[in-house]
Amino acid sequence: MGTDESRHSAVLRTVRPDGTPVYRHRQRPGVPPVSVVRFDTEDAHAHLPPDHRHAHDFLVLVYVEEGTGSFAVDGTERPLRAGEVHAVPPGQVIGVAAVTELARSRAWSVAFTPDAVPALASVSPLAWTHHPLLALFAPGAAPGRVAGPDRVSWSAWLADLAGELADPDRLGAHEAVAALLTRLLVAAARLAPSAPSAPDPLTERVFAEIEATFREPVSAADVARALGYTPGHLTTVLRKRTGRPLLEWITERRMTEVRRMLRETDLPLDAIATRTGLRDATYLVRRFRDRYGITPQRWRHAQRAWP
């Protein structure tokens, strides 16, 4: 469920004021930002402490092959049933209160960042809730349920994805990973309700203001003031409704644009910093390394070295 950080190649990024750890996906040069874990024995969960609460800044898709169990998302218990597909967006607090219950499930967990999917690589994180491929990640979306005849295909796709990731240097592995993950997201999106839930008006206003101003050196206080709120109040409300505070959304939008420019242009870091509301190249490097665990130069080189 994103519950096994070491096997999911995740590392601690920060700890929230309430003590909840937040993990980021480990960026390994030359390896797609995707990891797959199959939970099929009690040993897979044995090292987890009771009430293992945490959040992550990547997306997680969970497919339950068989068995039962449960986990909590933002304090709400989610039962696990065979054939279900659960989508956990970044920022939500995940808890596993009873490892023995979880251990009775056989499930796959796929953790990934949008850079792994060509159709999502340059999409603003502010638009994720409206993107067709991420329909199951929309706020309030119920788990999808795979029809009996299709479950063999789901297990095969996940096994194939795990196999490609086990040998990322093999010819065509990166393309295969992108294709298989896209196939999974398409299948998951088709399980989502046909009528999307109504967008939250305040969240929409915040996101619109961030989109209009992130290229300038604006702060969370500037965004809050423009909307007539105090930074503390808006941060609290936004975290409750989206799982992430205001500053994190501003930073995420900037970092998405930084990654796009690193991938698609030859602009020097100073120019990229100027165009994304960051002070200078030194500050950009520090924020990028804090966020992804790798320098922008190494990240750019790795992107261009992919087959």
Image (cartoon, helix red, strand yellow):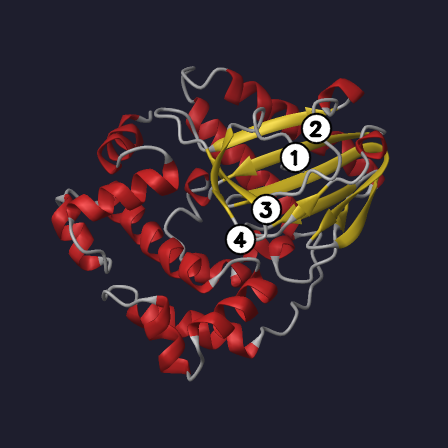
Q: For the residues carrying marks 3 and 1, which lies nearer the camera in this image?
A: 3
First reached walking from the N terminus: tag 2 or tag 1: 1
Is residue 41 at all visible to an observer of this figure? no
The residue wearing badge 2 is 48
Residue type highlighted by circle 4:
Pro
Disc 2 element: loop
Residue at screen point 45% across, 62% down: 126
Q: For the residues carrying marks 1 and 4, which lies nearer the camera in this image?
A: 4
Image location (x, y in percent) of residue 176 = 49, 28
Image location (x, y in percent) of residue 117 = 46, 41
The residue wearing badge 3 is 20
First reached walking from the N terminus: tag 2 or tag 3: 3
- Rendering quarter of residue 208: bottom left
Q: Quadrant of the N terminus?
A: top right
Disc 3 element: loop
* Residue 185 vertical position relative to residue 251 in the rendered view, above or below: above
Residue type highlighted by circle 3:
Thr
The residue wearing badge 1 is 3
Question: Is 179 on the left or on the right of 223, as rendered?
Answer: right
Residue type highlighted by circle 1:
Thr
The residue wearing badge 4 is 17
**Tag 3 and tag 4, C-beta contact below 8 Å:** no
